[in-house]
Image (tube, grey):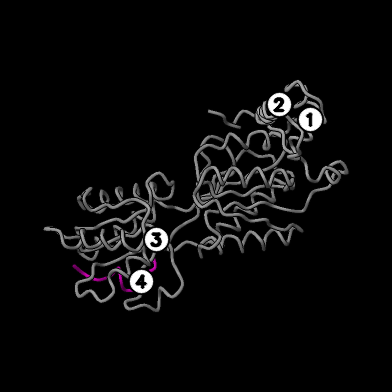
């Protein structure tokens, strides 16, 4: 496993140059330049050798070499999200932009669509454009590809989920405590058959929220029943099917905890018009949740606070903070509105 825990933050590591690539590949600098710039006239086998050397050395084409030679920054920060169209990440993005603008920097944003390859592609593209720093909501668990950039001085902050195999600044929300509190709340109204609808368990937040649900059952004296858990990528149809199974079983669920705002919305649509609706607590607040009938009880956390904390950490690093990597966990609070207070 590659980590940065033993790397001296004061140490300056020289970036690989075209000369280094040419030497390792056994070609001329001009050939390296042609491969990097995707020009014709290079034999495929030679191009493959150059690309292998580039990957081994962590070489990145510098699109702002003139600025860097003068010792100035590019005035940009890269932000890699799951989906810029998700209202939760819109709040994160806005907060990062506000903090960065006050520091004289602009934000470049891209969506990974939960694809680790796309995450890597975006992060390295931002690095090739010499962003001053990176903020990443990780889609995967392998981030050693960032080690050359981090060693060379590009600060990276992970948010919403931790990195898989590097040590870096991280800002999270209290996923475990949140779902444990949801179970406690529902149990206080007499529920003993409580279900959980979560995202794919290999997603960090989904796994942690399931862990919190299990712990909440133990603390509340509620029997954890695996048959009351439905995990996986959820669309409207799968949520409807899961709720039907859970609420029509011989021992039906009388309450449901949903693992994120999208699952909550799908669940509300599936339950619309139902005579016997289970009590419901959703993780993540969402627009108009307080205006529905009944208003939706949620586990709320501030997306803006998440983005702001991550951006402040990043800019502190850019201002010279060389302290050990930090892990910040932001609180989650239960907002009781009605849907989570119905008795079985």
Q: Is residue 54 above or below residue 24?
A: below
Question: Is label 2 or label 3 in front?
Answer: 2
Please state the horizontal and vertical placement of residue 52, each as a whole percent of the image.
65, 27
Q: Quadrant of residue 45?
A: top right
Q: Residue furthest left?
A: 250
Q: Is residue 270 left or right of residue 22?
A: left
Q: Earlier in the sequence, mark 2 or mark 3?
A: 2
Q: Residue beneath label 2, please?
A: 46
Quarter of the C terminus within the rendering: bottom left
What numbered label is drawn on residue 122? none
Q: Residue beneath label 1, please?
A: 31
Spatial CA distance of label 3 from label 4 is: 10 Å
Q: Main secondary structure of the magenta part?
A: loop
Residue under the point 54% across and 42% down: 117
Q: Residues within 10 Å of mark 4 (few under 14, many from 20)?
A: many
Spatial CA distance of label 2 from label 3 is: 52 Å
What secondary structure is found at the residue carrying circle 4? loop
Q: Is residue 268 above or below residue 216?
A: below
What secondary structure is found at the residue carrying circle 2? helix
Q: Residue beneath label 4, please?
A: 296
* Residue 337 within the segment the image draws in magenta: yes
Question: Is label 1 or label 3 in front?
Answer: 1
């Amino acid at each position: 496993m590659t980590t940065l825990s033993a790397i001296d933050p004061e140490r300056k590591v020289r970036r690989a140059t075209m000369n280094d690539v040419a030497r390792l590949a056994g070609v001329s600098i001009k050939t390296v330049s042609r491969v990097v710039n995707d020009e014709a006239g290079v034999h495929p086998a030679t191009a493959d050798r150059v690309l292998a050397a580039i990957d081994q050395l962590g070489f990145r084409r510098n699109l702002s070499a003139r600025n860097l030679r003068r010792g100035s920054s590019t005035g940009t920060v890269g932000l890699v999200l799951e989906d810029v169209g998700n209202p939760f990440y819109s709040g994160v993005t806005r907060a990062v932009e506000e903090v960065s603008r006050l520091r004289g920097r602009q934000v470049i944003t891209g969506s990974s669509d939960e694809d680790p390859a796309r995450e890597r592609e975006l992060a390295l593209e931002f690095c090739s454009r010499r962003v001053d720093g990176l903020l990443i909501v990780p889609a995967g668990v392998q981030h050693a590809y960032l080690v050359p950039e981090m060693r060379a001085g590009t600060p990276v902050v992970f948010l919403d989920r931790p990195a898989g195999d590097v040590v870096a600044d991280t800002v999270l929300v209290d996923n475990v405590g949140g779902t444990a509190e949801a179970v406690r709340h529902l149990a206080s109204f007499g529920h003993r058959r409580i279900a959980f609808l979560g995202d794919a368990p290999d997603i960090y937040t989904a796994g942690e929220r399931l862990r919190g649900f299990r712990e909440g059952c133990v603390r509340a004296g509620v029997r954890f029943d695996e048959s009351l858990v439905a995990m996986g990528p959820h669309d409207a149809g799968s949520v409807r099917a899961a709720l039907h199974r859970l609420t029509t079983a011989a021992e039906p669920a009388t309450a449901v905890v949903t693992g994120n705002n999208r699952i909550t919305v799908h669940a509300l649509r599936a339950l619309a018009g139902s005579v016997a609706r289970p009590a419901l607590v959703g993780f993540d607040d969402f627009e108009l949740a307080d205006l529905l009938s009944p208003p939706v009880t949620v586990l709320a956390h501030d997306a803006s606070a998440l983005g702001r904390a991550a951006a402040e950490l990043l800019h502190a690093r850019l201002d010279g903070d060389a302290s050990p990597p930090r892990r910040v966990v932001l609180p989650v609070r239960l907002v009781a509105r009605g849907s989570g207070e119905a008795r079985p």
